[in-house]
Amino acid sequence: MSKTPVIFVMGVSGSGKSTIGKLLAEKLSLNFFDGDDYHPKENVEKMAKGQPLNDEDRIGWLEQLNLLAKENTKTGAIIACSALKHQYRKLLRKGLENELEFVFLKGSFDLVSERLSKRKGHFMPPELLKSQFEALEIPTAALTVSIDQTPEEIVESIMQQLHLN
């Protein structure tokens, strides 16, 4: 891996993508981008109403995140994005085949549900977690890290496994 990686921190809502992404970016002195900030208004409104996004809803959003990754290949970046399905990760990787990594934050439904119940002020209601787990296709080409640790331990594990420390 290059010294300035582009890393997608992925997983279901509530798995810690933003927390881990920010910590990892800070540790590596890279920019952090939260994929949620790039959702079109229609997607945010749909999720806020408790309606899960479908594949069509996500296409433009994923294309925008792919462009963001391409814009940051020279400087490196950490991007938080659910990337639930293989086809989504394929679209995110388009044109960047060997220039980015996926880090999958893996946790049980019960653990993530408990975390979501404590989260305030996010547009994604906890009720949509079931649809996220149903849509999730466990990645085979990603570094997988259990979220059953402290954020600092998770970041350290990622850095060790990606040989970044």
Image (spheres, rainbow, N blue to C red):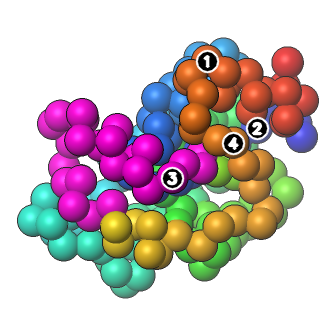
Marks counted in the figure total 4
Q: Residues within 10 Å of mark 4 (few under 14, many from 20)?
A: some
Q: Which residue is mark 1?
A: 152
Q: Residues within 10 Å of mark 3 (few under 14, many from 20)?
A: few
Above or below, 14 against 118 in this view is below
Kind of residue indicated by mark 3: Ser
Q: Which structural element holds mark 2? A: loop
Q: Nearer the viewer, mark 2 or mark 3?
A: 3
Q: Nearer the viewer, mark 3 or mark 1?
A: 3
Whether 77 is among the magenta residues is no
Q: Quadrant of the N terminus?
A: top right
Mark 3–mark 4 distance (CA, rounded to whole Å): 12 Å
Mark 1 touching mark 2, by CB under 8 A? no
Kind of residue indicated by mark 4: Val
Q: Is residue 84 visible?
A: yes
Q: Quadrant of residue 121?
A: top left
**Residue 116: percent from the left, percent from the top?**
29, 43
